Amino acid sequence: MKIAVGLSGGVDSSVAALLLKEQGHEVIALFMQNWHDTTGTLFGDCPWKDDRAIAELVAKKIGIPFHFVDLSDEYRKKVVDYMFEEYKMGRTPNPDVLCNREIKFDAFLKIALSFGVDYVATGHYCRKESFKDNSGKLIHRILAGADPNKDQSYFLCQLNQDQLSKAIFPIGELLKPQVREIAQRASLPSALKRDSQGICFVGKIDLPLFLQQKLEPKDGDVVEIYQEWYNSNDNYRLCVPGFDLVNEDNLCSMAKPYSYSSESGKIIGQHNGAHFYTIGQRRGLNIGGHKESLFIISTDITENVIYVGEGQSHPGLSRKALFIDSSEVHWIREDLAMKAGETRDFEVRIRYRQPLQSGKLFMKKEGLYIVFDQPQRGITPGQFAAWYSQGEMIGSGVILR
């Protein structure tokens, strides 16, 4: 087979290319330049020119052709502009998920196919399996990676069957130390290269500074919410451990975020724009006088107010349910899609590296409700919830509330 590898200059994609070459495939390397603006990026983080140089050396070492593709325009339009718009509306996007859906397995895939390849391979720590259903149709499955500490299936939660039909994940069965060992044994130039951090292809950033390219700073109040407020809040009583879902009329209330006002607590400081902050964040407030760290529990973009609570166990950080609008529900396994009125048990994660959480999915005409067995910390609008069954990722959706 002829396979194009998205060679980033990192050790994971390098080993993916090496393994495919050793298996006897015709392999070509494609390096993507997706971002070159350093505004808001931290010095020395993920310089693409260095990455390209390493990728070229890896390709030469393995003995495969190397090609350079510039997808920066597509990346700006489909990922970065999306980020700005989401933050502007008070939501927290996941650009890595969008990068895989819109860039690596869309724009990049199309370019790779123009080289006459059969498949595109990446260095993701996940696995793919395929089978034919009773009608003979080929169905593709995304399975968690063998390394529980590096499983990256979550980042692929928006892929569809067409995209998966062209995807290969050569290192999904390996542990990270094994990948490093293979790279060192083959003397690959990327063998000791540190893993990249931050936003896909952008790197580690100063988020407020990065967002100020399009979002203006705006002074507002920081309001602290105390435990007493929750004692008389009906929604909170629905979210405490031990609450038993008696009927489905409670779904909307359980998935409704807590609603605060400036009168709900005490003004303790100022911020420079509610759209620069996200639920669960504890850095960047610069407010002292507390025994424990302050965490953001809610943001109000309209009134430009940030609400905070003291300590990781603050009740405002946790809820037991979330809601995904029907237009945002995505089924990787379309053959397993739920119909309105159906209820199923799944394991769910709402962020990368989070251990899977047991929960029940309720499909309604208006959308999907997910009710967890235990309250979840930091349910954040704009992020993706992904649901799994026996290690297979079945679907995902953007959290509305």
Image: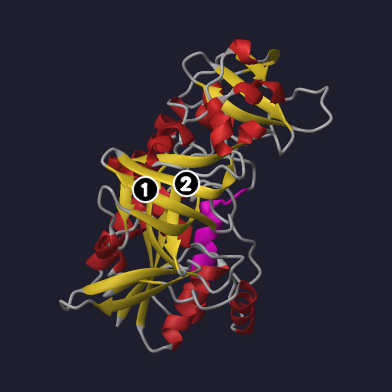
Disc 1 marks a residue whose amino acid type is Phe
50 magenta-colored: yes
The residue indicated by pointer 2 is 371
Residue closest to the eye, 228 or 214 = 228
Q: Identify the disc placed on residue 348.
A: none
Q: Where does the C terminus fall, quadrant-wise?
A: top left
Is residue 388 toward the left or the right of residue 316 in the image? left
Residue at horizontal 59%, vertical 69%?
Answer: 190
Residue at horizontal 37%, vertical 78%?
Answer: 27
Q: Is residue 278 visible?
A: no
In the displayed structure, 76 sits above or below 304; it is below
Q: Looking at the image, is mark 2 or mark 1 earlier in the sequence? A: 1
The residue indicated by pointer 1 is 362
Residue 110 coordinates in the image, percent (x, y):
25, 60
Residue at horizontal 50%, vertical 18%?
Answer: 216
**Gap between marks 2 and 1, in whole Å?**
8 Å
Residue 285 coordinates in the image, percent (x, y):
69, 26
In the displayed structure, 276 sits above or below 36; it is above
Magenta region, main secondary structure: helix
Q: Residue furthest left?
A: 135
356 magenta-colored: no
Q: How many marks?
A: 2
Q: Which residues are magenta?
A: 45-57
Disc 2 marks a residue whose amino acid type is Val
Residue 58 coordinates in the image, percent (x, y):
52, 73
Q: Residue furthest front?
A: 246
Residue closest to the eye, 355 or 318 = 318
Q: Is residue 188 visible?
A: yes
Residue at horizontal 69%, vertical 27%?
Answer: 309
Q: Are marks 2 and 1 in contact (CB under 8 Å)?
A: yes
Residue 243 coordinates in the image, percent (x, y):
56, 42
Residue at disc 2, secondary structure: strand
